[in-house]
Amino acid sequence: MDLSPTRCCLVPGTWRWMLGVAAVPAIIQFVLMLFLPESPRWLYRKDEKAKAIAVLEQIYDSGRLEEEVELLASASMHEFQSNCTGSYLDIFRLKELRLAFFAGAGLQAFQQFTGINTVMYYSPTIVQMAGFTSNRLALLLSLIVAAMNASGTIVGIYLIDRCGRRRLALTSLAGVVLSLVILATAFILQSSSSLCGSLFSGSCQGVLGWFAVGGLALYIAFFSPGMGPVPWAVNSEIYPEAYRGMCGGMSATVNWISNLIVAQTFLSIVGWVGTGPTFLIIAGIAVMAFIFVALYVPETKGLSFEEVDLLWKERAWGGQGSHESLLGSAP
């Protein structure tokens, strides 16, 4: 069986439209970004305090606005006094930064190694593996999967500040493990020729096919609100100002390298061990991701950047580092 993700798209000429349509969201994003305000911290550092406060007014209510302005002023004064310019070497030299980067990069890696882009890239192929041989039906079901992914991300936007990043990620990963086990079970049972007998094999294969599609849908339902947005949200919050751009960029690189590895190896592993065992392997990785989040990823809900910096210092050095500034410890 040809497992190429393009197997379902054999209508002549449609690939041009497929590539052209991809420009539409890019255009929409470009237009919307014209209305995106600058970061309040950047404005404050440029001595445009009125504009910085105006941006904060769009985010916080009056009860918290004064506190955020005071925190912003204090942080800007500290940055000015320390005159800290970070380097890539500091990320691996300073224990606080190592812990933060380990948590952020680990989340990005596990986002990919728990199989999301495998599911999105190869969902038509996975549907056909499940026994749905119609190209049109396979594409229709994969479109439903994509729509669920988009809808789940919107749900995640609503939940991330209510449930917290850590709890949302842990719940998401628990559901991902369950759904991957369901998928693996469906494919393993399907590949067993002696399960249903010759008289009922056709109907049994159909039931198992829908069972696999149900596992696929459940996977998206759990992954998209949690492990979809949480790694990106956490990586925007856990690094100090001087290193945020460097660490965020390095973590994103980890994400895309992991994506490349998964995309290039998924079908080869399927060919070596079979579809069911491959999903069991991914389920095992999801269990490792659950343990990783439980041990190494702190809850950042409701914390300021300064409080997050203090949190990493306390994790790195215990009580003796709680009164020191992370930025002040950099050379």
Image (cartoon, rainbow, N blue to C red):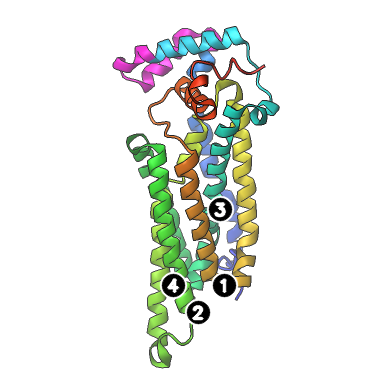
User: Percent position (x, y) of residue 112?
Assistant: 55, 50
**Measured Cα–Cα span from mark 3 to mark 2:** 25 Å
**Is tag 2's residue or tag 4's residue first in the polypeptide sequence?**
4
In this figure, which residue is indicated by the disc labeled 4?
186
In this figure, which residue is indicated by the disc labeled 3?
113
- Specify the principal SS of the magenta part: helix
Q: Is residue 80 magenta?
A: no
Amino acid at dot 1: Gly
**Measured Cα–Cα span from mark 3 to mark 1:** 18 Å
In this figure, which residue is indicated by the disc labeled 2?
191
**Measured Cα–Cα span from mark 2 to mark 4:** 9 Å
**Measured Cα–Cα span from mark 1 to mark 4:** 12 Å
Asked whether residue 232 appears in the rendered view, the answer is yes
**Is tag 4's residue or tag 3's residue first in the polypeptide sequence?**
3
**SS at circle 1:** loop
Residue 181 occupies which quadrant of the picture?
bottom left
- How many numbered badges does the structure rendering display? 4
Amino acid at dot 2: Ser
Q: Nearer the viewer, residue 149 or 115?
A: 115
Q: Is residue 47 magenta?
A: yes
Tags 1 and 4 in contact by the CB under 8 Å rule? Answer: no
Residue 166 occupies which quadrant of the picture?
top left
Q: Dot 1: within a 10 Å radius of its alpha carbon, few (fewer than 14), some, or many (20 or more) residues?
A: some
In this figure, which residue is indicated by the disc labeled 1?
274
Q: Which residues are magenta?
A: 45-67
Q: Nearer the viewer, residue 122 or 233?
A: 233
Q: Dot 2: within a 10 Å radius of its alpha carbon, few (fewer than 14), some, or many (20 or more) residues?
A: some
Q: Nearer the viewer, residue 134 or 40?
A: 40
